[in-house]
Amino acid sequence: MIGWFRKLLGTKKRTSARFVRVPLNVRAKYDAAMTTEENRRHWANVDYLSANALNSPDVRSTLRARSRYEVANNCYAFGIVMTKANHIVGTGPRLQVRFESKLLSDQIETSFRRWYDRVGLAEKIWTATVAKIQDGESFLIAVTNPFIATDGVQLDYRLVECDQVTTPFWSPTPEQPVDGVIFDAYGNVQAYHVLKEHPGDATLVSSRFDYDVVPAEQVIHIYTKYRPGQARGIPEITPALPLFAQLRRYTLAVLSAAETAADFAGILYTDAPPGGEAIEAEEWVPVELERRMLVTMPAGWKMEQLRVEQPSTTYGDFKRQLLSEIARCLHMPYNVAACDSSSHNFSSGRLDMTSYFRSIAIEQANLRRTVLDRIFYTWLREYLLANALPLSLENEIETAWFWDGMPAIDPMKEANAVETRLRIGVTTLAQEYAAQGLDWEEALRQRAREVELMRELGLPLTTEDQSKQTSIPEDEKEGVEDEEVPANI
């Protein structure tokens, strides 16, 4: 009866209990996650803030001020920032338009180059790159400039310091901006709060909190996003700021020690007991001595020159290690940061530059995506409207940007490598010219003009042709060999 009732309810017969071995709880430990008396002070400033909470306006303002001060007063800081910007931007990027109509492509390239030079876009991109390294971010705002008017285009870009992009204390917008950046519900940037005047300007005309709400389509925000959700940037040399200060303090300490050792500085002392034969002298009174003078001491007193115990002989090694650590946060090798390759051989110098050139290429690719393409297509839209061309061409035109090529450490080896790659078909002329910062179409057209002119003038095209032109024919060579040489030669 009980069995039938269990089948009806779908329950199973209880089986006898079995002994099941439960594994013991094992706690895995990491040394880096443990807090001890030895490392407690080292990790005292650890926080769990988000990217935007960590990079608050006050924190970023302090970092910017210290970074600008260090770059303005430290030769190495200034040189490192300028060198990195020079390697990234160089003389400026150059555009190549790819379109099925060669005539229209050349026309657009020519018009864009005129506008590019008129607004000084290369200089503005260079300044924005310097601000990105020094301040952490920079802003380019599209404006209408009636004094440009190049091929009907009045587009211009105004550089704005990051101090000027901030949210005032009162904002009528219902959104919650992140210090000047307004997001929508999906995380897309909608607009920016831009103060009409710089908050650090000494000649403020309007109110300090007067601002404009600029749509995101008009603003190009350049910064490095280190963490997900990060809306504002911090100086790229932030980790090196304490090291720059240490380098300056150590240099001053070594200089002070050298000056102390060079000067005639010392202390008067006596071995006589109090009330003895030594003449009484007033304590802690400095005595000014002239250089290169023979002086006499009071009776019972001796003079001992101050000895400098500071190890100034290790100054060079300490400075080198500190500069290497400073430049590491910018992916820059020591020989570039210090402009000193005396301790490098060819192989080590080439190896160190490889990773640095890779970081430069990444920076240039980011500039192409976030800055150059946006600027070009904004200009192209206005150019098409001003010249009564169909706007559908905007979706058919592709761009290619060329930067200054990095100089080869060994030109002969690099030329042989290029020749080998072209011969076995693993590269193209476009790729090789692009590596040198050149437009392959312009280079080939220029080469064709040179070849045509050389043929017109009867000049040899290659070294083989030159050797054939200067070589002596076989029939004439025999006569030359048999000819007797005058004795007076």
Image (tube, rainbow, N blue to C red):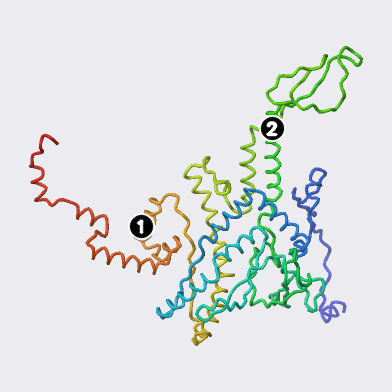
Direction from residue 444 to residue 361 in the image, left or right: right
Residue 1 sits in quarter? bottom right
Please name the residue shown 65% across and 63% down the image.
224
Query: x, y percentage for residue 394?
Result: 52, 81
For label 1, count other residues whose C-alpha is less than 10 Å away and answer few (under 14), some (14-19) or many (20+): few
Look at the numbered disc 2 and give the secondary structure of its residue: helix
Residue 66 sits in quarter? bottom right
Query: Which of 422/33 is in front?
Result: 422
The amino acid type, in three-letter code, at marker 2 is Glu
The amino acid type, in three-letter code, at marker 1 is Glu
Query: x, y percentage for residue 482?
Result: 7, 42
Residue indicated by mark 2: 259
Please name the residue shown 75% across and 60% down the image.
61
Residue indicated by mark 1: 419
- Mark nearest the camera among 2 and 1 is 2
Query: Which of 74/276 is in front?
Result: 276
Direction from residue 103 to residue 351 in the image, left or right: right
Q: Which mark sits nearer the N-terminus, 2 or 1?
A: 2
Query: x, y percentage for residue 176?
Result: 78, 74
Q: What distance separates the C-alpha of mark 2 from that of mark 1?
A: 59 Å
Q: Do callouts 2 and 1 mark residues in contact (Cβ within 8 Å)?
A: no
Query: x, y percentage for residue 367?
Result: 57, 66
Tag count:
2
Q: Where does the C terminus fall, quadrant-wise?
A: top left
Query: Which of 284/422 is in front?
Result: 284
